[in-house]
Structure formats: C-alpha cells, structure tokens
Image (spheres, helix red, strand yellow):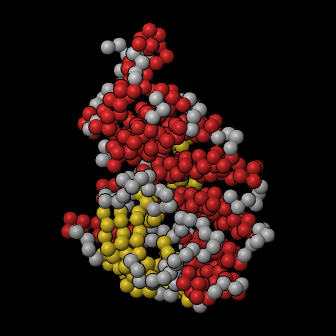
Amino acid sequence: MLKFPLFFLPVKQFMFNRSVPKLFNVLALALMLLSGAILAQETTELDGEDWQNNFDQLLVDLLLETGRALVEQGNLIAAEKIYAEALQVAKINHGLLSEKQFDALVPLLEILIEQEKWLLTNQQLAYFEWLNGKVNALNSEKLLDGIATLNRLYLAAAAHRTDSESGWYLVAAKNLSWRAVSLIQLNFGNNSLKLPPWLYQIVLNHYYQSSLNQRQGLTSYNFKTDEQAVISGWSLSRIEAVQKNYNIGFELLNRIREIYGNLSEASAEQDGLMLVYLADWELLYGRHDSALRYYQEASTALLNNGVDKQEVEKYFRSPVFLPVAQLYAKLPPGRGTQTLNVQKFVVWAPAFPGINTPQDQYISSTFRVPENTVSARFSLSASMESGESSCNGGNALNYRVTDVQITDLDAEKEIIRERLTRDISALHLRPPMLDGKLLEMEGLRLQYSFPTESNYPEFIPNP
C-alpha cells in the first residue's frame, strides 16, 4: 500500500482510516510481542494507519517501554530503532520543542555511544544541546539539569573512544561545565553553592585529560571546519600539557575552598575537607611531600575546630582510590569502618585504565560492565627517593602501591598478568593516616574489574 507522511495524507483517507481504540490495542500488543529478530529488520516505515496513531498520547511511553525491554535483552540494534521512532513520534505528538523528546533522546544517545556510531552520536549530541537551550531557556534549574546530562553523555563518549577523538569529547564536556559555571554566576551569584560541584567536575576533567596525555605523549587538538574534513594537529608536549592541567585544577580547588570559606555559616569541617581534596590533587600529580603536608593540615584543622577525634580517625583510617568522583563538604558517612575490607576498582574505560568508574558513568545497568574481574593483594609503602620533582631538588617522599600479587587469574588470561600487575601498581590511593602520620599497609585485598583484552590498551604509568 502507499505510504504517506502524515502531513501529506489525503484528507479523505485520513478521515475514514482513523483508528478506533481497537487498532491501538492491536498496535500495543504487537509492539509488546515483537521479537528481536523482527525488530531488527531493515524497514522501519509505518503504514498509513500506523501514522494516525502517532497522535495517541500513550504511544511514546509504549515505545519507550519496548525500548527498555530490548536493552535488557541486549538487542541494541532493535532498541536503537525503537528509540529513534519514539523520538520522531514525540516530535509529532508533543511538538518540536517538547520536553518529552528527552525521554527518547537520552537512551538513544546511550545506545549510539555503546555501539560506537560516532556520526549519529555527534548529530544527536548537537540536537540535545540545541533542544535544551530552546526548551529550558527561561528555566535556569532545568537548563543546568540538561547540561549535566549532556556532560555525562560527552564523558561516556570519551570513555568509549580509544583514538584521539576521546580528547575532543573531554574538551566538549569541559566547555559545557564552564557554560554551567557562567550560567550559575549570572543567575545565582559568584559565591553560589551551586558552583563547587561544577568546578570540581572541571577539575576531574583536567585530570582525565592528564591521564590521556600520559599515554599519548602529546596533546591532540581537532579543529572542525565548515567542510566535512577534520583538521588534526599536535600541540604541547606531554609534560607541558600535564603541568597546565595541574595548575588549572589547583586553582579551581582553591576557588572552591574560597567559596565555602565565604559562607556566613562556613565551618572548619568544610575547610578541612577542601584541604584533603588539595592533598589528593598533589598526590595525583606525584607531589607526595606537599600532599602529606595538606593531609596533616586537614587533620589538624578538623581536630582543632571541634570535630570529634574518633570521626577524624575513622575518616583517615582506610585508603581511598583517587580521584574521588564526588565533592563532599561534610565528612561522608560510613567511611573507614573496616580497614581490610576488599577494595573494589572498576576500570572506567579502556582509554582510562587507571581511573575508577566516575559516579553515574554507567550508562545503564546493562552497559559498560567489565567482562573480567581478578582478585589481587597489594601493599602501600612509603619511601624517600631521589629524582622525583620536588622544590629542593633533593629526596622526596614516594607513597605508592607495591607488592602486587594476582591471586586468581585464569590460565587463558595468564598472558596479561604482567600488564595487570603494572596497571594496579600505577593506581593512586589516598593514604591511611593516624595522628598525622602515614600508615604503611600490607595484604590489602583488591577486586579489579577491567575490559576485554582486545580493548585494553597499554598504559604508561606516571613518571
């Protein structure tokens, strides 16, 4: 039969073929029972009668439910088609500037990223940004929520890519965060408490860039023109790029500390925790002497300003993988209750083997779950070594993971034992402390989850 878009459908056919509730029930039943094989067929065009049902208010929700079921079954090809259809139906049924589109657009983008369909991903990311700016232009809170979602999607794309484009997505996410900062300053003031989480997201982004640079040797910048071609170039050496990222992150962390310090209800607990984040930053960049000083200052500040000693000791009692993905302005509950619990580390992505999965960076419960998990034991050791960058050029503190032992590696994975040992040794942990002194620890247990070997690139540890 002839297929017409709704806006070209002859009036007579439109009037007499208009569906009654029975037809909708049939369509609903069909969508619920369609198998993955049927949904994976190439053709996705709708018959004339089906076009009429685009006006049914329940159709978008039905398609979304079907898409979720297909994702749970692992049928991403079929789910992509269903979510793409839901997006188009939302435009027709609710309008080109409707919020309903986000319900289909977000999972569609997640699936496109998972399947590494980068051309379609970039198109839909650009559409998401445009739609968010149009729909939420007069609502700053919703606009920020949309930017946060888009930022998460850009980071997910950066994690999935293993080529130079990964850095492009990181830069795009960072630029989004700066736009959020500008929006908050304009609408809520320069000292708004909405600023610290966004500033910290930018800090993390700079560390992700440093981690990427340490593997590539040079920083890649891609400049898109009006033409289809992409002009690529290399700029800044690895050392220069890493130093720049360190400087910006350090400055932003001090800005966060300043914002909390300017509050009328500013507390010593907040300031002490900001010193901890500064110490973490120093440790991530190999400045272990200054990191120790900041940790000691933080502990002293907390104790001298009324924070219970047992709470402080509990906070510093056990090691924590760095960077910490969330900014805390208060002592987080449940920290350090058991020192020798099994530590869990889930590699974020092949492009970032030394970074634990950031908060909310699992696209969904079925995506990005590493296929391999091994158990290991390791120690945390402190030593004074020469040659490390330090202010006086002499001996410097080095606190690191040592004595890594993989305890349950399958025989078929034995070939990667050396690589896993090296990567685990390169992990950064916030050191446990007691009374301002570093604690060396042995026999710490680790559950280390990582991607398949074919997608698991070589990782160059920090110098």
Is residue 294 or residue 194 the one in the foreground? Answer: 194
User: Residue placed farthest to the bottom in the image?
Assistant: 435
Residue at position x 67%, y 62% in the image: 196
Which of 85/225 is in front?
Answer: 85
Image position, residue 331 (x, y; %): 60, 76
From what the image shows, is residue 58 above or below residue 70? above
- Look at the picture and state if 313 lies above or below 227: below
Q: Nearer the viewer, residue 5 or 443?
A: 5
Q: Is residue 156 above or below residue 27?
A: below
Q: Is residue 158 left or right of residue 272?
A: left
For this orientation, the residue located farthest to the left is 411
Determine the residue positioned at 40% across, 80% down: 341
Residue drawn at (35%, 13%) of the image = 2
Total numbered badges shown on the rendered structure: 0
Give the residue drawn at x 61%, y 69%. Answer: 328
Q: Quadrant of residue 455?
A: bottom left
Q: Look at the image and tell me whether residue 164 can be seen.
A: no
Residue 305 spot, x, y in % from top left: 71, 84
Question: Which of 157 and 56 lies nearest the eye of the viewer?
Answer: 56
Q: Quadrant of residue 38?
A: top left
Confirm whether residue 89 shows in the render. yes
Q: Quadrant of the N terminus?
A: top left
**Coordinates of residue 147 in the picture (x, y in percent):** 60, 47
Where is residue 159 shown, x and y percent of the image?
45, 53
Taking the image as shown, residue 103 lies to the left or right of residue 390, namely left
Task: Relative to 326, say whether 129 is above or below.
Answer: above
